[in-house]
Image (cartoon, rainbow, N blue to C red):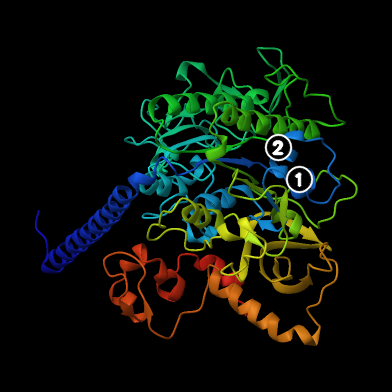
Amino acid sequence: MIYSSRSQVLVSWFFLLAATLTVTFNNYSLLCRAEDEEETARNNVQRRTRPNILLILADDVGTGDVPGYWNNHIVDMPNLKRLQEMGVTFLDAHSTPVCAPSRYMLLSGNYPHRGERAKGSWGFEDGKSQFRNGQKSMASMLKNRGGYHTAMFGKWHMGLGLPPGNGTFYNSTHVLTGGRVDWSKPVVDGPNDFGFDQAYFTAASVGKGPYSFFRNGYIETNMSDVVLWEEGEYNTTNNNGISKIRNSDEGDKNWDSTSYNMILVNETSKFLESHITLRPNDPFFAYIALGNVHVPHSPPTYYMDGTPVAGQYDNVHLDMLLEMDKVIGSLITQVEEKGIANNTIFIFASDNGGLNMGYPGRVLRGFKQTIWEGGHRVPLVFRYDGVFPKNETRTEHFVGLNDIYATLAEIVSVSVPQRSAYDSVSFANYIKSKENTSGLRDYLGTWRYDWWPIKEFGEQLNNHQAIRYGDLKLVQSLYSTNGSFSSKLYDLRTDIGETRNLIDRFEYRDIINEMSAELKRIGPCPDDVTTTFLLTDGMKKGREVRCDWFVIQKQACIWQTVGEVNCNSICGRHQSICKNVNHN
């Protein structure tokens, strides 16, 4: 083949660029690995004293669904009440309004837009995880820097890829049998690729296919046992309730939505048994992502201990909340019966606010999917016997799910890896005493982009963003029907229901401008910084640069988080969103 001189130059330039990027990533990977190994060696002596961590994440459970918040919950929850009585309950904790971005927020310590997609990554349809190259999950940090034995059970829902293969593609209607997928290989970007030693999980929620479990990346279903589940209700093989399919999709012929959460309890039990047998001197981190109470609501007739579930309340949503409490009790009891509860941190949280079930007496405005408090104010409880106080609440300051990352790092005495947990602020001392508010975050942002547009006062809302500062909450919304923005300001101390808009009050003018500027700075579309700043990652960490440095070193945008934060016009990845939200 004959090339022109121009083509030869282009080819040479391409290979030079590829070689440069390869060397850059290899050097960065070696640096990160060396940091992990150095810290692991330094902290090996602490392994026996580091606490175990049991993190339970509920699905679509709001503060109005559980005890300890507004005193209007319907379902009796003795196990969650006991957890609250033995620990600290946070009354002002926040997620995002929808599940997938919140899960990344929790495990990454980042706001959602620090990941691959500002809207979050969800399942096989996204082709890869929400985690970007170089970002370390909470599990990776605990495993590589703290010597933890790590496990994940339940709903992943942060994006993952099909097993690699020649000609493989995503088939939206036949994800298991279509797309020429070789299911003898593991999935890509699943839990085991992000620090979990063991994992038994579904790609998405109990309400979305494929309706199969994956163990350590490998599908548990034989391809000969794959069936197409149509939307509807089905009798269970063990006659323990009605299994429900909300969205038609492929899955295992034995799929049973009523057993989802009990399966997670059994998997956790097996993990604890193997941990005590094989790694008794190491701490464990177990992350259990429940199906409760995502739709479809299919409560089992009886829980695994023989106690009734279905039909105990007026509707199946409440029955699912009842089962959730039983699951919480089972998971905690497993640890207690093994005699290791006194060295275990128990955490209970939810991925977003509750569902719009129309129950009377609700205090918060909004529900899942909305920017209002009912959409992202979530339950959060910490228990650590002998270290954290008992039967206390925290109302003085707000925290985010993203803050749990830095909090656990401080508690177990490991450092946060580079390029990770950029938006995480530890509240470890705040757990110990409500007086310890020093060092807590000043602002907390919340975003919701384009998922299931909502109508309010006849106008369709597509993009929303909000920010907290003290008791004040600034909300900005795009009305897609006419392209205009609205801004609202609420004082949550006197107006938790967000009913009195203070945006036009003159005395709030300056603070509104400050909050709006901070919301833009921490969001996906910040203005470029005009002064010098320090690089925060990699071998050039600590170097002083300006934004024009990224013009010359464009590849650095990939591995320098500060590039995207400070130089959005050069390194930004969310320009389609920025066209809509950059209105200040």
* Contact? badges 1 and 2 (CB < 8 Å): yes
Q: Nearer the viewer, residue 129 or 430?
A: 430
- Above or below: residue 457 compared with residue 413: below
Q: Quadrant of the C terminus?
A: bottom right
| Count of residue discs | 2
Residue type of the residue flagged with mark 1: Leu
Tell me residue 541's x, y (percent).
31, 70
Residue 253, picture quadrant:
top right
Tell me residue 270's x, y (percent).
50, 23
Residue type of the residue flagged with mark 2: Val
Q: Nearer the viewer, residue 247 or 308?
A: 308
Q: Nearer the viewer, residue 570 or 201?
A: 201
Looking at the image, residue 516 sits to the left or right of residue 541; the answer is right
Q: Residues within 10 Å of mark 1 (few under 14, many from 20)?
A: many
Q: CA distance from mark 1 to mark 2?
A: 9 Å
Q: In this figure, which residue is indicated by the disc labeled 1?
A: 355
Residue at figure coordinates x 78%, y 67% from the top left = 492
Q: Which mark is residue 293?
A: 2
Tell me residue 342's x, y (percent).
56, 38
